[in-house]
Image (cartoon, coloured by chain):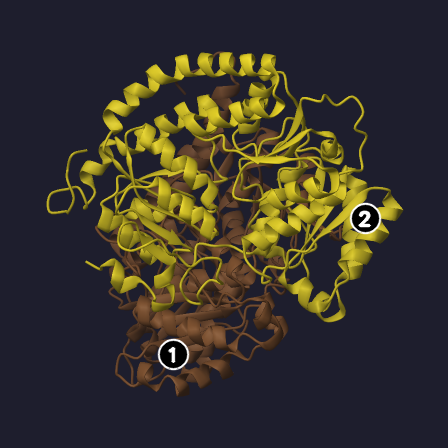
Amino acid sequence: MPTTENHYVSTTNACKLCRPIGACLAFRGVEGAVPFLHGSQGCATYMRRYIISHFREPMDIASSSLGEKNAVFGGSSNLKQGLKNVITKYGGKIVGVATTCLTETIGDDVPGIIREFRKEEKDLFAHEKAPLLVDVSTPSYAGTHMEGFHDAVKAMVDQVATKDGSTGRVNLLPGFVSPADIRYLKEILRAFGVSGIVLPDISETLDGPALLDYEKLPGGGTPISMIKSMGSSKATIEFGRTISGQDTAGRLLTTRHGVFLSQVGMPIGLRETDQFFSAMEEVSGNKTPCRHEKERGRLIDAYVDAHKYISGKRAVVYGEEDLVIGLTSFLAEIGIKPVLCASGGTSGRLEESIKSACGGIVEPPLVRDGIDFYDIAGEAESLKPDLFVGHSKGYRLARKLDVPLIRVGFPIHDRIGAQRVLHLGYRGAQSLLDRIVNAAIEKKQNDSPVGYGYM
Amino acid sequence: MKTASAVIFEERKDQIYRKGDAPFDIACNKESLAGAVSQRACVFCGSRVVLYPIADALHLIHGPVGCAVYTWDIRGALSSGRQLHRLSFSTDLQEKDVIFGGEEKLYLALTELIDRHNPKAAFVYSTCIVGLIGDDLDSVCARVSKEKDVSVIPVQSEGFRGNKRAGYEAACKALFRLVGTGDTNNISPYSLNIMGDFNLAGEIWIIRDYFKRMGIEVVANITGDGRVDDIRRAHGAALNLVQCSGSTLDLAKMMEQSYDIPYMRVSYCGVEDMTESLYAVARFFGDLRIMERTEKLVKEELSVLYPKLREYRKVLAGKRAAIYVGGAFKAFSMVKTLRLLGMKVVMVGSQTGTREDYLELEEITDDGTIIVDDANPLELSAFIKEKDVDIFIGGVKERPIAYKMGVGFCDHNHERKEALEGFSGMLNFAREVHSTVMSPVWRFVPRRAEGGTGNANN
């Protein structure tokens, strides 16, 4: 089915977020990092609450808090003062500075201001543990939060990673996935006997334990020493079909430091996970460990157990492009027919990737990129879906259509446990399968006049 | 353990006052300190908060998508009819719009949305970038207004032009363009407008019911469950009741000046302020029957409420509370309300309080209470720790600070799903406080578990 054109000038209920929030999320996954927005105070505050409501964790984002005079004369003095304050009070080991539409438009030269700042504040940088400053350009009027996320990862690799001999480590660039996903990926790396560097690593920074004190900088995150050493790793595995072949952090490590790059899709479902495990076998030189083989086997067993309850069900899938591609691949495998795959992203690669993800199992569905929820609603009603798979902003539409919503991705603002949602790998597929099938069964049970309790 | 002094910025020291330490003095209404992680938002946020609940108006945010998407249906402002306010409309400006200007896109988007939704009016919010690229919002709005025969009102809410207060003012100016354009025939001499209530969890319906029982007509809700046509005739009311920290105070002042309508500041939170507000209204009208009905109402409500409150008070007495809210006015009621429950307020602060606000807080709080303006997570967490609080009352941004440290939390912000105003709201509030303060989960958090500081009396 061909992609149809967007008909409207206005956007209603966007299916994307703005670019700087992605950068803040990526910076949060680095040990001792302070995400810092160069812009007006509101941006940081709005993004903080958006992120807090999903992870239910503290999320401090500093701001240069620009006022009217800065908008006229430039934000340099506020940026410098802000940097100094976060370094002295928060003790940030790394400050990730992302721009906003305001500072991009007034044309602040952030790399230049940072250079000046280093010169002016020699004392802050004169010692061994001097903080690192990483800057990334994230104009809100171009791209989505995912561009911001990937930009920030690339900026860290660009500005921090070096090559100094060979460590034999494996870099893993997973993109924006849940803390539970990251924990699981690290387990997989260990199981393959690989010393891995996962960037970013939000497994603890955005899913921490109950504490006695408020931490200025949450524990966990990719250690800076590890980011520095990424150029010395033997290989990089990077997730995301839409960024494959693009100018990414993984690509940069290849061109600049000669690190072998393996790009795979976001490993959701059996086939995409198989690709990831093949890549792991290739870079580690080891076979897939037995317990993960067994998880794979149990997953297939579960596919069989479940298939009749969901056979031919029609799904609307929406969210970030690479997530949608992975989910579509998974849904196709279990016999669900994706009828609409939608994203606010505009990589231009969604349709071909969806086609390939369907892999001849099902007819490729209607694919819409650069879309908002007004358009999704317009398409969905006539497609008669049985379920929605996406983040919680599709709730009102799912409710209107009286179909279950399987909450995945970001944001999940109307449930608890978003940080624990597992999407990736055999185990993530198992969890998604159980949730989807049980939602279908529950719907049938609820709709049943007799309310059966055995099947 | 970090102490409060270790986390307080030199530049912010004069924005923190400890009652009893020295004669009252506090700095406020300052620009937030760069790098301090202020809990404040921006001008746009202030305007959006005030106008958002007008449910039959179109709210179009002119700018890149972020400002619209972060304010999409995030508040509990209910509507009894149309739900237009729950949609998030944006011009989603792209790079080429920034370079060549966004006026054409704004015109097309506005026209499209007005055709689609047939709103009673449209508010067009300006964001940071619009102020910079120089789009002429006024002329686009005027053009569409004329072509579509519907009021299209620009809101000058560029984020960087100040803080939330400036946004309130911009919203009031926008509202004032509607006021005075409707027919005021058949409005009772015993009438008022409810201002600064946003109908969170249906609160304005509770308050409207009280006025109905008192025999007073409510002309316009400004803006909870608000309607454009009601606001147009708001100048026909005899009195403006202003709640909330000045979010609609500017409008009341403008209406006083132009239409000679007096205003009165009230609060519907807590028994004391709720009762006093109703009596103040009754006294204003000076009608014996209204006063009698008010007395009857208060008596009825309190006879139901007090016995139930006493139960909560028994267990909550002596617990320590910290309050951090957007506007300080709400904090006054909170201090009194918590006291009614036998609790002690040990810290109270706000994002945008004025000197007068803080002075009043100083008067009604106990010695040792920390009063803070424009705080940040490090300060708030240090105060929580120092004062060993049992409950934090605030909004979404404060919740993880409290929870992470093992402290109870009550959401008194715009996201709340429990009505906390009026007499029934007071009971809900007590229940909310009780449900968190007395939860068994605190037994297990590091702060209260063996080895933690503080008293393990939960």
CB atoms of marks 1 and 2 within 8 Å: no
Residue B373 — which label?
none
Against B298, residue A18 (above or below) is below
For chain B, the rendered hue is yellow
Q: Residue at x 37, y 53 (%)?
A: B372
Query: Where's residue B294, x and y in %?
Result: 53, 16
Between residue A130 and residue B94, name the one nearer to us: A130
Answer few, some or many: residues within 10 Å of disc 1's Cα (few below 14, many 20 plus, some between 14 and 19): some
Query: Where's residue B221, x and y in %?
Result: 64, 31
Amino acid on which the number 1 mark rests in the picture: Val
Against A29, residue A448 (above or below) is above
Front tag of 1 and 2: 2
User: Is B421 on the left or on the right of A87, as rendered?
Assistant: right
Amino acid on which the number 2 mark rests in the picture: Thr
Between residue B451 and residue B214, name the one nearer to us: B214
The brown one among the chains is A
Count of numbered circles on the image: 2
Outermost residue on the left side: it is B451
What residue sits right under mark 1 in the picture? A160
Answer few, some or many: residues within 10 Å of disc 2's Cα (few below 14, many 20 plus, some between 14 and 19): some
What residue sits right under mark 2 in the picture? B111
Where residue B376 sits, quadrant-wise, is: bottom left
Q: Residue at x 19, y 58 (%)?
A: B1
Element under disc 2: helix
Query: Where's residue B279, x and y in %?
Result: 52, 23
Chain of the residue under label 1: A
Between residue B405 and residue A246, name the one nearer to us: B405
